[in-house]
Amino acid sequence: MATKSKRTTVYFDPALHRALRLKAAETDQSLSDLVNASVRETLAEDSEDLEAFETRAREPNLSFEDVLKDLKRRGKL
């Protein structure tokens, strides 16, 4: 991978975890590789949303308080 991996905790249903472990063993892959591939595949199914995510990623972050102040200022709240 070109970028450094991030670690997270994911809780799986026991039966799903067992199936993942079996699939990993059968395909000589790690659980992480399987999960990453599945997530990539799922995300790729809706490229329109991915484009929106990329566009939104460049937007500035606004605090909740600032959004509320702006809505009140504009008479929306």
Image (spheres, helix red, strand yellow):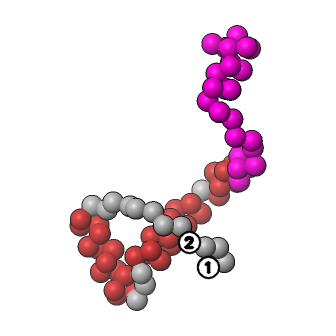
Looking at the rendering, in which quadrant would you find the N terminus?
bottom right
Q: Residue at x 50, y 70 (%)?
A: 36
Q: Is residue 21 above or below residue 56?
A: below
Please report the residue visible at 40 percent of the width from the left and 87 percent of the height from the top. Answer: 27
Q: Amino acid at mark 2?
A: Ser
Q: Which quarter of the figure is the C terminus placed in? A: top right
Q: Are marks 2 and 1 in contact (CB under 8 Å)?
A: yes
The answer to whether any part of residue 28 appears in the image is: yes
Mark 2 or 1, which is nearer the eye?
2
Question: Looking at the image, can residue 41 be seen?
Answer: no
Rendered location of residue 12, percent (x, y): 31, 62
The residue that mark 1 highlights is 1
* Residue 49 or residue 30, whichever sits in front: 30
Disc sitting over residue 5 in the figure? 2
**Residue 68 appears at what percent x and percent y?**
64, 21
- The magenta span reads 54-77
Give the SS element for disc 1: loop
Spatial separation of the CA atoms under disc 2 and disc 1:
8 Å
> Which residue does the image show at 34% across and 80% down from the upper left?
23
Q: Amino acid at mark 1?
A: Met
Q: Is residue 69 shown in magenta?
A: yes
Foreground pick, 71 / 50: 71
Q: Identify the residue at horizontal 63%, vertical 26% (top origin).
A: 65
Q: Residues within 10 Å of mark 1 (few under 14, many from 20)?
A: few
